Image (cartoon, rainbow, N blue to C red):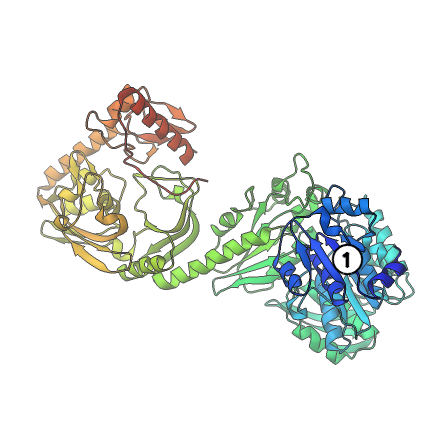
Amino acid sequence: MNLASLTEFLTSGSRRVHLIGVAGSGMSGIAALLLALGHRVSGSDKVDTIEVQRLVKKGLNFHTPHLSGEVNGAELVVYSSAIKAGNVAYDEATQLGIPMVRRADALAAIMNSKKGVVVCGMHGKTTTSSMAAHVLRSCGLKPSHYVGAEIPILGTNARWDSEGEYFVAEGDESDGTLINYHPEHAIVLNIEPEHLDFYKDLAAIDAVYTKLVTQTRGKVIYCGDDEGATRVCASHPGAVSYGHDAKNRYRITDLVVKNFRSHFTTWRGEEKLGDVTLNIPGAHNALNALAAIALATEIGQPFDRIASALETFRGARRRFEIRHESPRNLVVDDYGHHPTEIAATIATARTGDWKRVLVMFQPHRYTRTLALKEEFGRAFGLADHVFVANVYPASEKPIPGVSGQTIVDAVLANGHPSAFHEEDITKIHQLAGARIQDGDIILSLGAGNIHEAGARLVKDLETRDALSTVMGPGTIKLYEPLSRHTTMRVGGPAQFWVEPETEEGFADLVSYCDDHDIPFMVMGRGSNLLVRDGGIPGVVAQLSKGDFARYEVNGVEITAGVGLKLKQLTAVAQNAGIGGFEWMEGIPGNLGGSLRMNAGAMGSQTFEQVVRVRYCDTDGNIFTRTPAEMEVHYRDVPTLRQNYALSATLRGYPASAEDIAAKIAESTQKRKTSQPIAASAGCIFKNPAAIPAGKLVDELGFKNFAVGRARVSEVHGNFIVNDGGATAEEILTLIGEIKAAAARERGIELETEVQIVGVDA
């Protein structure tokens, strides 16, 4: 069908129309228009969406997945640019000889029945077409519209109004279908190299825009500050330029951009039209608003109504969309995926009062990443930290050597101090979140699914803020690497790392997490602990400050908070002339961990000296118990598995400074000669009844045996050391091999003494 016959077909009576790929944002808009025109519309796609379900309520007959039978009886099939031969519905329609048109053909035909306004350009067309539709509606013109995103202020991305004579549409240049439109007016925002997966070069892009401009009957409103738009549009008889430069027909002066708003004065030639306040961010959006002003003014609308409409305008989804706002941080999601868009969005972020800008970016298409890598390298200059995911392919096949690292390399080559690549899109929010400070604005940028990473970050920021309020004094961090806090120097991130400073705050935190089903654990100094590479979901608390670092000496008893290091406790006892604590001197842990597992060394155990323990339960209730009232075993205290120790009183005996010093020296010397100094978690296995674990490991031939960078110590067989860069997976593999050999060759089932926590990567 040609344009005239397709227009006649779609605007004169009810037809049976099927849409292949109806769930896409562009196709769902076509479905909405066809339903409003009274057609019987069916559609299919490989996924369902909220928008599809909204259309189903309006009459869409939807099916997923695509089926060949869905096109039976259709008088017309409309398909998206992503649909090709090989799709079962497409192939069936072809075989049956059903007329088939692309999305842009259908849109051009529908728009052709009204005074069409096509808004096009490489950047800004969704926002500008939305502004134009909103302004014309506010002026009482009842326009129909079609835009490429959800626009809350317009109600939906597509609307048909039979009473209005105008139709504002966002024109997609990515597949060359701009040539299908024969509009009354056109707005051309900018023209530069883009979509080079489709176009050979800039000349090919110019040719498509030139044809659109030639086919425009009325005004061609173009940005006179843009070289490409000027090159293509200036010679049209209806050309109207806009921009900052004084040569333009419509221009802006006195532009002030601050706190994500802008104020400016608008001129038409030498005539001052008036002032405009725009409540969406960015200097680039002031230009977009000027394009809408030029359109509305050229068709005779009063400036005061235009300015009033623009002041009430709110942006499209994923166009500098604020997803989280608190006194501490702001998270913004934006569709920007071209270097020009990225630079503009980051510049906009800088207009607020936030201290630093962090960017999570997902490249879109391998061809764009390769063709514009130098431009990408320059686009992130105003960001403090840049985190780049792997390429979102958008149906493209990978290009060897092209990935997110391509952009990181280009960014670093331009002198940027901080750019990182994360292959796993589900983890990029952790990479960024671990560096967040108060006062940061965080951007998620890209046309793929990077917004999902932003959503994950927002959820955790909201939880972080709630935990902080509950806890009171203390510190809380997102995605803290636990390798920093374990003596083994391995372990993935803690989702929420908290350091409360008061017993009351800690108890409230425990209760809150229990009420909200947030996993919770306490970590001491990180000895006798192996954290898996995926880290620990939920809250990990370290009690090392404030109330938990205090101690008091009373005779031969010492009452101390669980955060006190055992080495410090030994020193306190020595200074007070209290013996019995010397064995603790070389243990790299704190009192809390020692209590929880009844730690011991050199023939002594913690609970041999404990007088009483204060702990809280999961409801935040605090109790004091003696060892006789608790269940205590070798390297295990069941009472403290689900409860959390706060402090304890331990008893020693009077001793001279000389005796204490001698025993400490003896303990230190024995430890140096029998235990490795390399990074380790302490003893890996509990001692079996038949033979010490270290001797068994030696006899099995594992001394100095390694898996990756994890190695059995040559000093003591019950120690596994990290030779630098070992992973938890390597350590667990080594543990598994030792256990299997012990069972196979000696019939001994070794039990781990080290606590193994967390999830796999």
161 lies left or right of 354: right
Q: Say which of 24 and 475 sits in front.
A: 24
Q: Say which of 359 and 207 sits in front.
A: 207
Q: Is residue 110 visible?
A: yes
Q: Position of residue 678 (x, y in %)?
A: 34, 31
191 lies left or right of 425: right
Residue at 53% x, 47% y is 428
Q: Residue furthest right?
A: 237
425 lies left or right of 60: left
Check disc 1: other Cα within 10 Å, few if <14, some if 14-19, many if 20+.
Answer: many
Look at label 1 and name its amino acid.
Val
Q: Say which of 119 and 604 sits in front.
A: 119
Quarter that holds the N terminus: bottom right
Q: Say which of 540 and 518 sits in front.
A: 518
222 relative to 543, above or below: below
Q: Position of residue 234 (x, y in %)?
A: 87, 61
Q: Which residue is mark 1?
A: 17
